[in-house]
Amino acid sequence: MDAESFRRHGHELVDWIADYLEHPERYPVLSRVTPGQIVAALPNDAPEEPETFGAVMADFERVLVPGLTHWNHPRFFAYFAISASPPGILAEFLSAALNQQAMLWRTSPAATELETVSLAWLRRLMGLPDSFEGVIYDTASIATMHALAAAREAAVRSARSRGLAGRSDVPALAVYCSDQAHSSVDKALIALGLGLDSLRRIPSDDRFRLRPDLLAQAITADRASGILPVAVVATVGSTSTTSIDPVPAVADICEREGLWLHVDAAYGGVAGLLPSHRHLLDGVDRADSFVVNPHKWLFTPFDLSAFYCRRMDVLRETFSLTPEILRTTETAPVKNLMDTGVQLGRRFRALKLWMILRMYGARAIREHLTRHIDLAQQLAGWIDDHPDFERLAPVPLSVVCFRWKPAAQPALSADALDAANQRLVDRANATGEVFLSHTRINGRVAIRIAIGHIKTELQDVRAAWNILLQLRT
Amino acid sequence: MDAESFRRHGHELVDWIADYLEHPERYPVLSRVTPGQIVAALPNDAPEEPETFGAVMADFERVLVPGLTHWNHPRFFAYFAISASPPGILAEFLSAALNQQAMLWRTSPAATELETVSLAWLRRLMGLPDSFEGVIYDTASIATMHALAAAREAAVRSARSRGLAGRSDVPALAVYCSDQAHSSVDKALIALGLGLDSLRRIPSDDRFRLRPDLLAQAITADRASGILPVAVVATVGSTSTTSIDPVPAVADICEREGLWLHVDAAYGGVAGLLPSHRHLLDGVDRADSFVVNPHKWLFTPFDLSAFYCRRMDVLRETFSLTPEILRTTETAPVKNLMDTGVQLGRRFRALKLWMILRMYGARAIREHLTRHIDLAQQLAGWIDDHPDFERLAPVPLSVVCFRWKPAAQPALSADALDAANQRLVDRANATGEVFLSHTRINGRVAIRIAIGHIKTELQDVRAAWNILLQLRT
């Protein structure tokens, strides 16, 4: 494809994408294809001869578009609602063309330094101090893995060189989080060689917040058994109910016990942009590390996870390695991003965060966040006012968990209610009008509506509610 | 930014990118900014009010473009030369707009199944059997980490649940690779809790290939010391010289010893597309896993690393975890990509691989690869024919390692030659015309020219050579 063809097809694609963004209503939010349908519709082998852009786009529309679940849709309410905002999409386009690979400062000074700048902007918008240095990873799962690797290094002498296996000087290790924490903590501990058994899932309170008293007890019990406590992961905006752990009390314990405190604020962190909600980040300034995902609730195309650390030296000591081919000599000290983790190559992700923050500006971003929170409160109000629905968790941010529980059928068993609510979610999704997901709260099935797409308005939330009202049986 | 503004700015950006691709000669290949220059040129805080696309692009051109090192430039010869080809750039643009997050099959059937299809296409183009299942990761570093995590699980009972620490039933572990293997192996072992000391870097032969006899000896010695051998990483296209380890002999050893064999073919794997070079992949069909990076030598914008595994069940058993919020019920078995690793979220990366394979077709891709290999052979010939230059390694693929060694100054010390060659690289890069990197071979500084950009032609390699001829002193 020469430059002129690129120009022509690029313009065609801009129009396709503009139409796509303008008319989300053309598509069912949740894909309706059946498993294997797309594989079956495509050839077994790559073509020997080139095909035209038109032919490829025709197959894209015919075969792939029906297989899309439309995450970039204002009626996507499942998991966490995310947005690829227009400035973010343009930035990704530009980033792909530039093909920066920011392993070393000199292999992309722009990507390296813009990462510093845009992460500082975001940190300051959240009201968090300069003592945190930032780095961009792909996902919060990778960020949390790196946080816990640094925690492991801080707790176990020479883990980097000597590892954990076959060492009589290293006892069993323990990491703590609430029973609401994300599965990325489990996966990080698998990866890091601590194992799932090292994780203590501390019970949460009636608002799904980690109980500091039980945390302190668990640490004491582990120490008494000869187990070495390593780290605590607190959550600001848990996956199921968006509960907020009491970070100040957890920080007290971590400081007293000498444990690494990592805060998973992947979803909730951006609430710190709002003066009304900044208190949710209380205590995060005392964490050793925290993670917030602009690709969740900051309108940034997936992927961009912002990791902040007060002890980046420990992380660098854990992972920094410079083979000869990557040795450089600069006139001044430089930051080489490859030193901060497993991945050597890094895309120019900062560009999209920078363009989004500039093209919206902080005020408009706050307005979007506030609108989402207000919409969640309205939905919670409708649920609370309805005799046949029951809210199952507080709504500190923009996610609402509830269930259908008909007043006229008080004898329905818990299992029957679970089945009915799961069915209700499935039927709502089958309309193609909305996509909701479920969770379990205190063991029972809950309908979960996550509000966070940049174009989601009252009418969209109202539509989801009306669908549930119509389909309940 | 509304849809109409997106459309307008999208068209502007298409033209900017088309001009960029058409006129690489406008830019010095290696950025000339000084450390801190970009940070200093940008404000400390995000703006409160929105800025226009024009203002952002003006700053992009003024501040960031000088800070780009132009990886997408036909005279980028450093590290490995990569390409963001036009179809790949367009696919990334589309992928950003769709914002697919393929953690579960249902959250993007298209991304999930196109990953299966496009990875099968690539695997069959390389002549490798259907017994390999594929998954796309961001980088080969992450792929190798997952391969070794699966190897650890296969070797150490219950590593997933019980980890490695504080276990009297787990001895010290060992992993083997050549002294030429990539630093990602070291980083994986740090992450996985095996530690750097667990890595045995086996000496390579005079062509920089792992010596199977020494590998076998090392394994035997470790077993005799009560150390548990876990895995061998063989390399097809090593980072420094692109040497090719003798995979069949290594596979013999791994089969005999019951070790996991992972093949790092991140750069070299695509040579399997060429009938003339397919023998370089001999034995890879017997590996437990291998990785090849389309973002290296297959014209794919960074990032897309293709990981293939014959024992994906072990990898899934290591990492699969399904919290309630991610439980689904489909009518048929589905592949949920989140089960294959640490990362939960996954971008729609398969789209670019699919579009590249279709829009070029296999024949044209083979022609590009053949041209790069031929160019490297020509350069090697010029070097071999020149009295003042010395080639330092064989050229099995498209990378040439050599040094200036003037015939008229036979008394120059090894250190003086090192310094002179490092200086020559630096001076060549300072011209802005080319970007080369260096390596060390048998302890001595080598100039390294990596040919791999899709637009690199004879004139570009000739230009690099002429610059070196002019600047040698």
Image (cartoon, coloured by chain):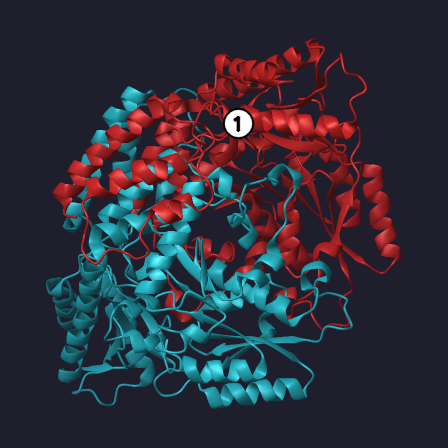
Chain colours: A red, B cyan
Q: Mark 1 lies on which chain?
A: A
Residue A107 visible in the shown view: yes
- The residue at 40%/51% (across/down) is B115
Question: In the displayed structure, would residue B355 be above or below residue B226?
Answer: above
> In the drawing, does residue A6 fall left or right of residue A303?
left
Helix, strand or loop status at disc 1: helix
Question: In the displayed structure, would residue B424 be above or below residue A197?
Answer: below
- The residue at 24%/81% (across/down) is B391
Question: In the displayed structure, would residue B171 be above or below residue A71?
Answer: below
Horizontal and vertical percent position of residue A442: 77, 32
- The residue at 68%/22% (across/down) is A402
Question: In the displayed structure, would residue A166 be above or below residue A45?
Answer: below
* Quadrant in the picture for the C terminus of chain A: top right
Foreground residue, B413 or A472?
A472
> In the drawing, does residue A414 fall left or right of residue A32?
right
Horizontal and vertical percent position of residue A145: 60, 52
> In the drawing, does residue B222 fall left or right of residue A48?
right
Residue A99 visible in the shown view: no
Foreground residue, B215 or A415?
A415
- The residue at 60%/63% (across/down) is B192
Q: How many numbered marks appear?
A: 1
For mark 1, what is the residue?
A: A429
Horizontal and vertical percent position of residue A467: 55, 17
Q: What residue type is labelled 1?
A: Asn
Horizontal and vertical percent position of residue B287: 47, 73
Q: Residues within 10 Å of mark 1 (few under 14, many from 20)?
A: many
> In the drawing, does residue A125 fall left or right of residue B89?
right
Foreground residue, A363 or A301?
A301
